[in-house]
Image (cartoon, helix red, strand yellow):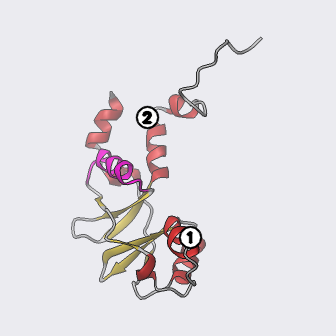
Amino acid sequence: MELARNLKIESVSRLEPTRPLRLDPSGDVSAAIELMRKHRKGCVLICDNKAVAGIFTERDFLRRVIATGKPLTTAIAEVMTPKPVCILAKDPVRLAVKKMEQGGYRHLPVLDETGRPVGVLSSTRIVHYLAEHFPSTVYNLPPDPLAVPEEPEGA
């Protein structure tokens, strides 16, 4: 079980979290969307005095802005997810996977020992990490792994 051991001992920093996009809480939704579009990222960290006050994701945009009919001039502080679950760069990968799975998160802010944001860990990075350990299993998964053909396929 090399993967189980690696999940316990390898740190989140091994996954090379992406550099965080930051926005001041006084910004608006249009500034956040423009930043996300420009850098092709799925979230922006809302930082107050170098600490993470919130996170604004594509999901927040759809659920809290578009679905409610709010204008793009809405303050980001009104529609962000406040006090997001974070992880330390030195924490084990296993903890990151557990937090993402339990909370249904696709992005986790990564902090250094002082609490400053140093990255964002995405579910995509986790998938790449798992594919690194089990490439043939991951790349050859059927669309529905529980579906078993009733008859052998082929000629």
Q: Secondary structure at mark 2?
A: helix
Asked whether residue 8 is drawn in magenta, I would say no
Check the image and name the residue furthest to the left: 114
State the image quarter where residue 67 is shown.
Answer: bottom right
Q: CA distance from mark 2 to mark 1?
A: 29 Å
Q: How far across and down, in percent of the image, does residue 20 sit?
A: 43, 69
Q: Quick one: label 2 or label 1, which is nearer the N terminus?
A: 1
Q: Secondary structure at mark 1?
A: helix
Give the quarter of the figure containing the C terminus. top right
The residue type indicated by label 2 comes to His
Q: Which residues are magenta?
A: 91-105
Q: At 36% across and 50% down in the image, what residue appears? A: 14
The answer to which of 18 and 100 lies nearer the viewer is 100
Q: Which residue is mark 2?
A: 133
Q: How far across and down, in percent of the image, does residue 124 sit?
A: 49, 51
Asked whether residue 94 is drawn in magenta, I would say yes
- What mark, if any, has residue 76 been given in the picture? none
Position of 16 compared to 112: left or right?
Answer: right
Q: Main secondary structure of the magenta part?
A: helix
Q: How many marks?
A: 2
Q: At 31% across and 79% down in the image, what residue appears? A: 50
Q: How far across and down, in percent of the image, does residue 90 sit?
A: 26, 55
Q: At 60% across and 30% down in the image, what residue appears? A: 142
The residue type indicated by label 1 comes to His
Q: Which residue is mark 1?
A: 39
Q: Is residue 1 above or below residue 62?
A: above
State the image quarter where residue 71 is shown.
Answer: bottom right
Q: Is residue 65 above or below residue 100?
A: below
Within 10 Å of disc 1 (Cα), the crowding (few <14, some 14-19, many 20+) is few
Q: Is residue 26 above or below residue 120?
A: below
